[in-house]
Image (cartoon, rainbow, N blue to C red):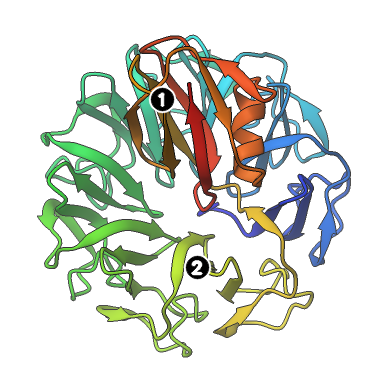
């Protein structure tokens, strides 16, 4: 969602609501009436996940198919043409898509067989095809195997490989690729000179590397102080250590950053022109890393200039740009400087998901506690029963084609998508 000015709320009852910019039909409502300031129900159901580019949207359906709509000038929707806008939700003309990753106007489809397809804007070589061109409107196979995951900035791309290495391509005007220089663009896929990278988080033109040892490195655009280095150089081309520790996770908007700390506190920096940092003012930029003036935040989801804080009690606060009603407050009063409660509840997710990894071993039965980003080296022989009626538990069962019990092969690793704020209380493995 970080490159979008439109918003989707995935609800506990399985429905989807939306609001914000719709000038390209990106909300999937079948029209381009703009803006949509009142939170509106999506006119179709069975949506499993949603992935957004700047003005594009992909709906991953429960049956595995993918629908899309929105801006398509560069062919980024994967429909094989550049007709734009696509205001009617349209099925992708191919199947077998496991995951979708969007930059500003370029798209990657990670397929069930492990291969990767791509389309869209390629003026900086961000598609990894080894050349530059205005656009690639026909979905094209990536000439690279062994890709585990993909992370995109605005016009640049990182490929996280099965062997732990990281490759990159695309825009490098600000040194955002972490190569130690600003040679631009990098159209050939290139190894980054850095090992031990656990995860990568990108803003618009800047990058954080979360390392295996828990440290954070950063590079790229820093004119707003968004790198957290307490200064505002135009760019930081050399990969630089973050000058503080204890960071658990990072969330980036267009040019602003939140650091979620091990102790539960939140620090922030960068662009604050619209009050998107949640500090209660529009002093801009915030180049010194600053503590958020409220606590109890469990997760943060950012658009280009709008922010949602998911709280420990499951309530949602929001702030920032609202000129298109994208905050879901039912109006277009703009900006919203003070973090404000959403006027509705029952939100399941903001198209922001993670994976639960479950491995079944042949040991004694027991109850295990389940939460996202864990590998359960626990018990189980052949069957698992989810003993929980929560939406997360139901989703887990549906994803694994379970009713009450499901057969799990011994030693097999299951990667199951679960929204990052949801919890499964218990599972009985037997």
Q: Tell me, for residue 312, which label it has, or none.
A: 2
How many numbered discs, if any? 2
Give neighbour class at mark 2: few <14, some 14-19, many 20+ (Cα, 10 Å). Answer: few
Give neighbour class at mark 1: few <14, some 14-19, many 20+ (Cα, 10 Å). Answer: some
Q: Which of 186 and 372 is in front in this view?
A: 372
Label 2 vs 1, first from the N-terminus: 2
Residue 53 seen in this snapshot: yes
Q: For the residues labelled 2 and 1, say whether their Cβ atoms are less than 8 Å apart.
A: no
Above or below: residue 91 compared with residue 342: above
Tag 2's secondary structure? loop
Q: Tell me, for residue 77, which label it has, or none.
A: none
Above or below: residue 283 compared with residue 95: below
**Could you give the CA–CA distance between mark 2 and mark 1, rounded to whole angstroms?**
31 Å
The x, y position of residue 211, in whole percent, is 17, 44
Q: Looking at the image, which residue is at 78% across and 34% down? A: 46
The x, y position of residue 398, in whole percent, is 67, 28
Q: Looking at the image, which residue is at 61% across and 39% down? A: 393
Q: Looking at the image, which residue is at 44% across and 41% down? A: 370
């Amino acid at each position: 969602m970080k490159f979008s000015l439109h918003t989707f709320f995935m609800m506990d009852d399985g429905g989807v609501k939306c609001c914000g910019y719709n000038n390209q039909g990106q909300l999937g409502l079948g029209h381009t009436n703009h803006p949509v300031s009142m939170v509106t129900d999506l006119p179709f159901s069975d949506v499993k996940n949603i992935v957004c580019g700047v003005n594009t949207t992909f709906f991953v359906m429960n049956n595995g198919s993918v629908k899309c709509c929105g801006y398509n000038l560069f062919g980024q929707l994967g429909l094989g043409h550049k007709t734009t806008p696509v205001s009617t939700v349209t099925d992708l003309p191919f199947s077998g898509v496991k995951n979708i990753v969007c930059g500003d106007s370029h798209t990657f489809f990670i397929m069930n067989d492990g291969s990767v397809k791509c389309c869209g804007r390629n003026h900086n070589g961000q598609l990894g095809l080894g050349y530059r061109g205005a656009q690639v409107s026909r979905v094209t196979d990536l000439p690279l195997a062994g890709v585990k995951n993909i992370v995109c900035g605005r016009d640049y791309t990182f490929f996280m490989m099965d062997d732990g290495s990281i490759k990159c391509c695309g825009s490098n005007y600000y040194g955002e690729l972490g190569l130690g220089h600003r040679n631009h663009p990098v159209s050939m896929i290139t190894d980054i000179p850095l090992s031990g990278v656990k995860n990568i988080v990108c803003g618009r033109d800047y990058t954080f590397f979360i390392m295996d040892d828990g440290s954070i490195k950063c590079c790229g655009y820093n004119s707003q102080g968004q790198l957290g280095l307490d200064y505002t150089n135009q760019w930081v081309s050399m990969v630089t250590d973050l000058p503080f520790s204890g960071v658990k996770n990072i969330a980036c908007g267009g040019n602003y950053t939140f650091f979620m700390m091990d102790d539960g506190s939140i620090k922030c920096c960068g662009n604050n022109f619209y009050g998107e940092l949640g500090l209660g003012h529009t002093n801009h930029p915030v180049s010194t890393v600053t503590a958020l003036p409220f606590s109890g935040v469990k997760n943060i989801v950012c658009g280009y200039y709008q922010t949602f804080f998911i709280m420990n009690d499951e309530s949602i606060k929001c702030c920032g740009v609202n000129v298109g009603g994208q905050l879901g407050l039912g109006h277009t009063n703009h900006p919203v400087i003070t973090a404000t409660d959403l006027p509705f509840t029952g939100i399941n997710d903001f198209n922001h998901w993670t994976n639960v990894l479950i491995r079944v071993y042949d040991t004694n039965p027991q109850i295990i506690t389940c939460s996202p980003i864990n590998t359960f080296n626990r018990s189980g022989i052949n069957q698992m029963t989810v003993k929980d009626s929560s939406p997360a538990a139901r989703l887990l069962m549906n994803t694994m084609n379970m009713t009450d019990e499901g057969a799990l092969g011994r030693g097999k690793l299951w990667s199951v998508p679960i929204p990052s704020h949801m919890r499964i209380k218990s599972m009985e493995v037997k």
